[in-house]
Amino acid sequence: MTANKELKDTVLIVDDEQAFLDLLSFNLSEAGMKVETAQTAADAMKAVALVRPVVVILDLMLPDASGTEVCRRLRQDPATAEIGVMMLTARADEYDRIVGFEVGADDYVVKPFSVREVVLRVKALARRSSERLRARLAVDVGRRLRHEGLEVDPERHRVFVESEEVSLRPLEFRLLALLMEHPGRVFSRAELLAEVWGITGDLSTRTVDTHVRRLRSRLGPYEDAVETVPGFGYRMRA
């Protein structure tokens, strides 16, 4: 594992193939980005804590854990939840893509790939990740979103139902916060993928439906506050 004290615009590549690390490191460095590398999940988590990368590129198969497990850990920690995550793997099955997005990946690229395309996608993901982080840090202190007895504290990533705190996964939290910020507005599934996951493309929108179901199950008496608009998408009941 390499180390770098500079935090801004750092990309962490996690893969156990040295040739792959060398190839992508060289090209991302040439594109003006700082690059760190790790070859195991354990070293990846240490590097994340040390350098706070703006993007993590994850191989799906690592010696000590799966890339999806690393992604899950990043999304569960509020301190790393806004990091951009790109899965880059030889496994092209739709099931693997869906699982990757389910655990919070922002992008999914299949080997073999165009190096130029990956560099462009990493730079775009870095911009989106930085924007998400700035937006989170810019939230007014003490500002809360409310819908009857449902309350969201965006700054502290906390949710309360009738004054009782409930636990949400990072993607579920972002989904709820977005809907509550725009009560009555209908979001299509494609819009939710773009706004919450930060991705566009041909990914099946079933992942949105899955997260909405999970979110509703945690809202108790307010599960119906997130309404389905047949043929369009979802909205927070005004």
Image: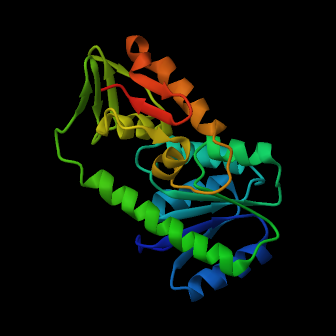
> Relative to the observer, which residue lies in front, 117 or 14?
117
- Vertical order, 135 against 226 (above or below): below
Question: Looking at the image, which residue is at 45% across and 61% down?
Answer: 129
Question: Looking at the image, which residue is at 28% across and 54% down?
Answer: 137
* Residue 46: % across, % down: 55, 57
Whether residue 2 is visible: no
* Residue 142: % across, % down: 16, 38
Q: Which residue lies furthest to the top in this view?
A: 221
Q: Please, which colouring scheme is shown?
A: rainbow
Q: Quadrant of the N terminus?
A: bottom right
- Vertical order, 82 against 153 (above or below): below
Q: In which quarter of the image is residue 7?
A: bottom left
Q: Is residue 216 left or right of residue 162?
A: right
* Residue 220: % across, % down: 42, 13
Question: Looking at the image, which residue is at 70% across and 63% down?
Answer: 39
Q: In which quarter of the image is the C terminus?
A: top left
- Vertical order, 40 against 208 (above or below): below
Whether residue 57 is visible: yes
